[in-house]
Image: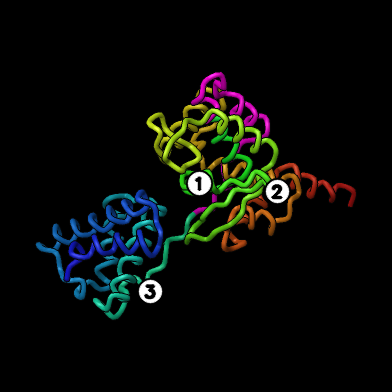
Amino acid sequence: MKISDKISDFDNFLSVERNLAERTRKAYRQELRKFVEYLIRTKGSEPLITKIETPLIRQYLNHLQMEREYRASSIARTIVSLRTFFKFCVQENHIKVNPLGIISNPKLPKKLPIYLITSELQKLLNTPDQTELSGIRDAAIITLLAFTGIRLKELVNANLTDIDFERSTLKVFGKGSKERLVPLNKIVLNSLRAYLDRRPISECPSIFLNRFGNRLSGRSIETLVKKYVLKSGINKSKISPHKLRHTFATLLHMNEVDILEIQKLLGHASITSTQIYTHTNPDKLKQAVEKLDNL
């Protein structure tokens, strides 16, 4: 049994049991195929899975770092992909020990999240042309992302039946298919109603439709967000749907919302993932330091 023999089964495992999106699964497949190509190039042929041991993995990682000049983040992604695959092989009884079990991820520099300040967010919300149906739809999408903090995949998979206007909530399914109710404020509700009043009739259950009446894809949403950021003149690069999630969390923290409540709203399994937003308010940090002025 070789790696190339199990890629398809592994992909099915990621799809069914891990509920990973196609884009994520594609990244896993690419990492595995790159490793297979390396093995064939350096060993002359692809070895059996049972012959792949930790020293060989380390040799490959060293190759990526020294010869391919991979960044630490890229090395970490490779390690996660290979570790997950070999863990799957252990579960399937193809091997007894995961060769990446004792390999640690490289330490990554912790960067503060990129987010929009209130004036920038307002400028972005005002950019779509709401005399056109597409503009009304796009404004609703940006509003929903920025005022709920839901993930891109959660938005893409959201259906009309998931909206409860009476209770002002949206039901979403997060990582691991965990269900949660996301509260909707008046801005979001008004924006959704404006779109749904003009939404084309379609058999597709999705909230947001493309021009063919089908579910709007994640890639399309990423593209439209980038388009409006550029059009708005906001001088920040790499603003994406996920950065609007950062914006939501950061603005909540700046308005003194409890970190545990932010965690629940974002659907974070661990508070550690949420704590990065506690470092994003320079005014508060300045006020803290100024308390020492009179000592």
Name which residue lies at 61% across and 24% down. 126
- Please name which of the two marks, 3 or 2, marks the residue nearer to the observer: 2
Q: Residue at x 14, y 57 (%)?
A: 41
- Is residue 280 shown to the viewer in this render? no
In the displayed structure, would residue 128 be above or below residue 6? above
Q: Which mark is residue 253?
A: 2
Name the disc covering residue 86, or none.
none
- Could you tell me which residue is drawn at 30 percent across and 61 percent down? 12
- Is 229 left or right of 281, judged from the image as shown? left
Amino acid found under the numbered disc labelled 1: Ala
Q: In the image, is residue 116 part of the stretch drawn in magenta? A: yes
- Mark 3 vs mark 1: which is more N-terminal? 3
Place of residue 57 in the rendered image (x, y in percent of width and height, measured from the top left): 28, 66
State the quadrant of the N terminus: bottom left
Q: Quadrant of residue 75?
A: bottom left
Marked residue nearer the N-terminal end (3 or 2): 3
Asked if residue 48 can be seen in this view, the reply is: yes
Quarter where residue 19 is shown? bottom left
Say few, some or many: other residues with alpha carbon within 10 Å of mark 2 (under 14 / 14 to 19 / 20 or more).
many
- Segment colored magenta: 109-137
Tag in front: 3 or 1: 1
Specify the farthest residue to the right: 294
Q: Local crowd at mark 1 within 10 Å, few (<14), some, or many (≥20)?
A: many
Please say if 183 is above or below 177. Answer: above
Q: Secondary structure at mark 2?
A: helix
Q: Residue furthest left?
A: 44
The residue beneath circle 3 is: 102
Q: Residue furthest bottom?
A: 96
Give, as a three-letter code, the residue at label 2.
Answer: His
Q: Which residue is mark 1?
A: 158
Q: Magenta stretch containing residue 282, yes or no? A: no
